[in-house]
Image (cartoon, rainbow, N blue to C red):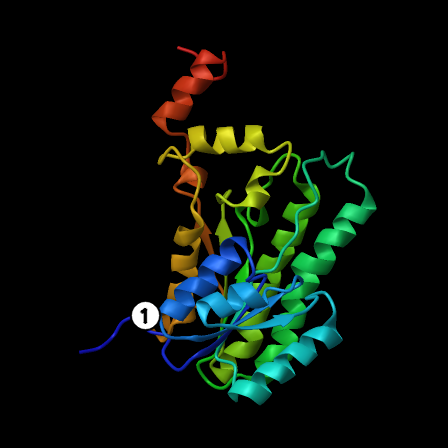
């Protein structure tokens, strides 16, 4: 009997895998049979060992450091089948006018260069059937107040994903990205984010924010051979937040004296 969504005998790299969504992805991949390498800026040897994973400390914004990480993986395991470009940073909640250039550069270095570096150094070692999944955001396909630097970097990730899908498709390598709304991780609970979380809970038809396990499930799907014709896509995971105004949100707007006042 066929085993669906298996990652048995697959070598997968998960950047930013030491915590949050990345750790949840690494855990799920291990359970699915993959050989997982957690690549993180922080030393996560203990976390990796507890999962039965390998680990490598690396700054994803540094191309040479990323090349060293990939060389280590190929030398130790012989191949790279799956790359999850998950490492990311957030520069806080600020209006566009109040966002200093340093915030844009910080988000660009990690969120954008981290993805391009990962693809550039890993793709040459992938054979036909390789899979790359980049972590974007709902803020990468819509506008979002007070998230200028983060949102701009995630829009770039979506664009990079589409370009990479076109360029690598001829080699049988699929590239997709995931665009979640707020996910219940420490990053979502940064100071100043309370109103955004409250707004998402009201605006989402499901009445809550996303859990990391739900994002990991989509990453898992895209990382398997079972969806071999999904390529170049930016897949939104937002509980229906972006499709329209639900009744609960309509009533909340009415109470506040908004456009749906009854």
Left or right, 254 with respect to 15, comes to: left
Instruction: Compare residues 67 and 144 and report the one nearer the observer.
Output: 67
Judge whether 169 appears above or below 160 on screen. below
The residue positioned 53% from the left and 83% from the top of the image is: 126
Report x, y in % for residue 82: 49, 74
The image quadrant that residue 34 belongs to is bottom left
**Residue 162 visible to the viewer:** no
Q: Position of residue 191 (x, y in %)?
A: 64, 34
The residue singled out by tag 1 in the image is: 5
Q: Residue at x 55, y 50 (%)?
A: 137
Residue 136: quadrant of the picture: bottom right
Q: Residue at x 45, y 67 (%)?
A: 51
Local packing at callout 1 (Cα closer than 10 Å; few below 14, some 14-19, many 20+) is some
Residue 250 vertical position relative to residue 143 in the rendered view, above or below: above
Q: Is residue 121 left or right of residue 231?
A: right
Of 186 and 67, nearer the camera is 186
Q: Is residue 198 above or below residue 15?
A: above
The C terminus, quarter of image: top left
Query: Foreground: 120 or 215?
Result: 215
| Image x and y of residue 1, in percent | 17, 78
Q: Residue pushed farthest right?
A: 101
* Residue 64 can be seen in this image: yes
Task: Please tell me how many numbered marks the rendered image carries.
Answer: 1
Give the secondary structure at mark 1.
loop
Q: Residue furthest left?
A: 1
Residue 184: x %, y % from top left: 48, 43
């Amino acid at each position: 009997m066929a085993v669906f969504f298996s990652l048995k005998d697959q070598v997968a790299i998960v950047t930013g895998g030491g915590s949050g969504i990345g750790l949840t992805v690494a855990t799920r991949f291990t359970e699915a049979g993959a050989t997982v390498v957690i690549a993180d800026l922080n030393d996560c040897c203990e976390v990796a060992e507890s999962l039965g994973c390998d680990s490598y400390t690396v700054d994803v914004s540094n191309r040479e450091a990323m090349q060293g990480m990939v060389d280590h993986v190929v030398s130790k395991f012989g191949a790279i089948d799956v790359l999850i470009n998950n490492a990311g940073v957030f520069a806080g909640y600020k209006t566009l006018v109040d966002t200093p250039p340093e915030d844009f550069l910080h988000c660009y270095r990690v969120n954008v260069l981290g993805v391009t570096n990962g693809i550039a150094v890993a793709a040459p070692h992938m054979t036909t059937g390789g899979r790359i999944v980049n972590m974007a955001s709902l803020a990468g396909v819509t506008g979002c107040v007070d998230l200028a630097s983060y949102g701009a970097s995630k829009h770039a990730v979506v664009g990079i994903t589409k370009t990479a899908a076109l360029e690598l498709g001829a080699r049988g390598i699929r590239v997709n990205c995931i665009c979640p709304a707020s996910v219940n991780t420490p990053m979502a609970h940064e100071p100043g984010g309370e109103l955004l979380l409250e707004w998402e809970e009201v605006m989402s038809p499901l009445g809550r924010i996303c859990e990391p396990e739900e994002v990991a499930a989509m990453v898992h799907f895209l990382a398997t051979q079972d969806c071999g014709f999904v390529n170049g896509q930016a897949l939104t995971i937002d509980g229906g937040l972006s499709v329209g105004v639900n009744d609960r949100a309509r009533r909340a707007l009415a109470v506040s004296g908004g456009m749906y006042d009854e």
